Image (tube, rainbow, N blue to C red):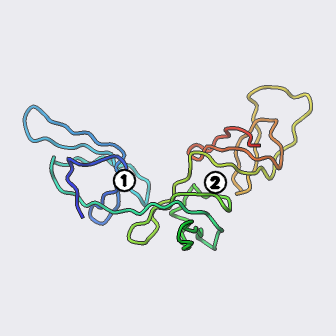
Amino acid sequence: MSVSTNDLKNGMTLDLDGTLFQVIEFQHVKPGKGGAFVRTKLRNVRTGAVVERTFNAGVKVGLAIVDRREMQFLYRDGDGFVFMDTESYEQVNVPAGIVGDMARYLSEGSMATVAQYQGTPIAVDLPASAALKVTQTQAAVRGDTRTNVMKPATLETGHVVQVPLFVEEGERIKVDTRTGNYIERVK
């Protein structure tokens, strides 16, 4: 399947010589002389590397049909992560290399969007924030009321984040999955 470079949209997945790229941004350019062209920023789906490519206007490029489904994370299985499609109950094993840094924020039962190309998982996207339990942190010192002082806290996934002094073990906190920063306590 192919698409014209005139019809590109952000988020589209292109198949360029067997490598999948997601369109991050694009710009149509009409110079004073010479033909029009399309300047794009593309993210390699497998490696995450961002490249810039320029195409002539109206050229056909390969369009990859990617199936994105909301799935529930069940458990870790050796070097992979097992997700379940909440509609069909089908289980999908996603290799750790594809989950990547998102593993830091995956707790059993959490939801994620799993993208598949021709039945093979190619990416895992999480919501902007995840609520996780603090399993280990230092106790707050009584009377220490300094503001903006942070301490390390280990989450249920094993990932360590910096949290304010008032956060205690056993509490649930919300963490930004893009930056890894503490957002707030969750009741």
Give amino acid for label 2.
Answer: Tyr
Q: Name the quarter where the C terminus is drawn.
A: top right
Which of pointers 2 and 1 lies earlier in the amino acid sequence? Answer: 1
Residue nearer the viewer, 76 or 89: 89
The residue tagged with tag 2: helix, strand or loop? helix
From the top left corner, tell me how far across and down residue 106 is, in percent.
64, 58
Residue nearer the viewer, 95 or 6: 6
From the top left corner, tell me how far across and down residue 2 is, in percent.
22, 61
Q: How many marks?
A: 2
Q: Residue furthest right?
A: 142
Q: Which mark is residue 117?
A: none
Q: Name the quarter where the N terminus is drawn.
A: bottom left
The residue tagged with tag 1: helix, strand or loop? strand
Residue 11 horizontal side relative to residue 121, left or right: left
Residue at image location 60% in from the left, 63% down from the top: 72
Label 2 packing within 10 angstroms: few (<14), some (14-19), many (20+): many
Q: Quadrant of residue 185?
A: top right
Residue at image location 23% in from the left, 47% down from the top: 54
Residue at image location 25% in from the left, 61% down from the top: 62
Q: Are marks 2 and 1 in contact (CB under 8 Å)?
A: no
From the top left corner, tell me how far across and down residue 86 is, in percent.
57, 65
Residue that badge 1 annotates = 22
Residue 95 horizontal side relative to residue 171, left or right: left
Q: Residue furthest front?
A: 87
From the top left corner, tell me how far across and down residue 152 is, in percent.
75, 43
Residue 32 horizontal side relative to residue 136, left or right: left
Give amino acid for label 1.
Answer: Gln
Residue at image location 15% in from the left, 36% down from the top: 30
Residue that badge 2 annotates = 105
Residue 76 horizontal side relative to residue 22, left or right: right
